[in-house]
Image (cartoon, rainbow, N blue to C red):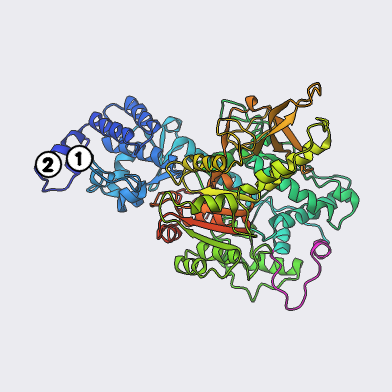
Amino acid sequence: MNRSFADLLPTPLTAESLAQLAPLSRAEDLLLLLERWVERGWLRALDKAFVAFLHERDPGGDPLVLLAGALTSHQLGHGHVCLDLFETLKAPDFALSLPPEGEVQTGTRLLPSQLLEAVEGAHWCKVLASSPLVALAADGREEARHRPLVLSGKRLYLRRYWAYERRIDSALRERLVAHEPVAADLSERLDGLFGPVKAGAPIDWQKLACALATRGAFSIITGGPGTGKTTTVVRLLALLQAPAVEAQKPLRIRLAAPTGKAAARLTESISQQVRTLQVADNVRDKIPSDVTTVHRLLGSRPGTRHFRHHAGNPLPLDVLVVDEASMIDLEMMANLLDALPAHARLVLLGDKDQLASVEAGAVLGDLCRDAEAGWYSPQTRDWLEAVSGEQLGGSELQEDHDGRHPLAQQVVMLRHSRRFGEGSGIGQLARWVNQQNAEHARQLLAARSHADLHLLALKGEQDRALERLLLDGQGDGPKGYRHYLSLLRNQRPPLDAAPDDGCWENWARDVLHAFDAFQLLCAVRKGPWGVEGLNQRITTALLKARLIDSDQQWYEGRPVLMTRNDYGLGLMNGDIGIALKLPERDGQDVGRQVLRVAFARNDGQGGVRFVLPSRLNDVETVYAMTVHKSQGSEFAHTALILPDALNPVLTKELIYTGITRAKDWFSLIEPRSGVFEEAVRRKVKRLSGLMLELG
């Protein structure tokens, strides 16, 4: 017989407590409580709809099952692939971020901690295991395959996400045991690309990464900004392609990234690297530089979760390289692995310490959990030393003597940053934040001893020092938004220049490049310190300074961010464009101008495309953008503004990602002191079973 919530709650209870809790003895009353949570913004309407679906399938079911379903769906919305029952019971309100951080609890509405106070993990698992709505992970019966929830040990999944995890697990296991043929002269080829080992030189991790990737069907190259991930992968492609070209069987190589912005950056970077590569021309010609988005590579079908390429119609390629892999969520990784031919190699590039994907899962972070420690087996170490000439004995790497880290044998972490040297304040700050050393990070900012770091402590919401920084930057150093708008006005071609004259495209390209000199990043979207409030505040300040002539929807100088892929226009989510006035193309009225939005072409050639504003449906103003949206981008001067109160998104990963978007200068803007330290001390802990299953 099902136990009621009243039976599960502690005694003695006050009359007031009993009045609150008694209705929860029935599933219908739990649904009513969840409805109140939705009204208050604690749960999504989608979470409540999922619970209603469960209740419809099992009207007499235990309310604990419905509550678990609601919380699993809620956790999915927060990026967690599953609900860890025991972790949730340790501190329900914290584990679930309910109530949302910063909200003052008022009234008599129940908290998750009150509902679950007397629930034991073993009992909760038992109730779930006996429910007709829940399948056990090991249950292979046909009947179990149609149950909407899956219990795997102490982790509860929505079936779809449990299936994604299993598909990834299965695909990676197969690839990790597959050994690719290695060229007999691999050592000579490595020396040709990297040079022979020099006595006393530090370990060349790029060389080791290339060596490891040649022998496996799956490999990961991770590292922070400036550690040479792109340089490494270009040399890896040369290493793989050269023997194939010599055998007159060139490899079909494809390059992809999660967003259009990341794809454009990689296209430009790889194009430059390939041009200077010391290889034969016929090999260089077979190394592609065009990078596409993962969605376009797979052939997305608008309005569905399906793709043109899948297990039954695999991708026509032999090698696939995916950059910015930290942005790939669980579902996309499962689809990518499904569409990969069995013989093809997959190489993932990315920074394991960056923010995870917006959607559920932290795939790269899970797969790179052992990257820093190494955990190479004696066999792997011996092989690496033999083919590369490098000596790993003096390193601080851990050894895997009992074979418990199969994945680690195909993961290499690049450790030397060429962008942020020892004297770089940005590099030091990023390292302290990554190590969660809030005290040292604060001391570094407060010392003001590095020209590339700036701290702005605001004296209130109306402090005009914010506008001064955002518009004018810092003296002769970091730029603000005045820079690109001044260039827009002062370098405009003469009106009588022909519409198709290259001077207009050159001007547009220069304006786009100047805009990349500065970007304001936010942690949140709402409120005075979020994207929406700050975009309006900056627009008003620019209008007041007469740097723009309107604050209506479209005006010259408005920067916009694509928020969805538009394959018809060839524009991707994350692309940034700027509205510019151009002469009419028919040339009949020299004085007539029309507003068009200029976007950089994603072809590595530096071209520009012009689009009428009326054709852009999914754009937003982008003086301020979220840190999440900035992934895959870099700006000469990056300013990160924090909210004035803690928020669930504030973690060391968010701060680290914001800092490392800066190429030359970084500014931290603080409406309230202390928030920075609290965020640095918090680490994203996305729950999944992926790493546990891979061992």
Quadrant in which residue 551 is drawn: top right
Residue 489: percent from the left, percent from the top? 70, 41
Q: Quadrant of residue 591?
A: top right
Q: Which tag, 2 or 1, sits closer to the chain's start?
A: 2
Compared across the picture, whether 551 is left or right of 687 comes to right
Residue beneath the point at 69% across and 56% down: 229
Local secondary structure at mark 2 = helix
The reply to whether residue 452 is visible in this rendering is yes
CB atoms of marks 2 and 1 within 8 Å: yes
Q: In terms of image quadrants, where is residue 319?
A: top right
In the rendered image, the vertical position of residue 394 relative to residue 586, given as above or below: below
Q: Nearer the viewer, residue 177 or 185?
A: 185
Q: Is residue 191 magenta?
A: yes
Residue occupied by mark 1: 108
Q: Which residues are magenta?
A: 186-205
When the figure is inspected, residue 213 is found, relative to residue 41, above or below; the finding is below
**Residue type at numbered disc 1:** Thr
> Residue 297's spot in the image, x, y percent?
68, 36
Vertical order, 41 against 442 (above or below): above
* Residue 649 percent location from the top left of the image: 44, 49
Asked whether residue 223 appears in the rendered view, the answer is no
From the image, tell me which residue sits under label 2. 16
- For the residues marked 2 and 1, what is the alpha-carbon distance in whole angstroms? 9 Å
Q: Amino acid at mark 2?
A: Glu
Circle 1 sits in a helix, a strand or a loop, which is it? loop
Of the pair 242 and 615, the residue shown nearer to us: 615
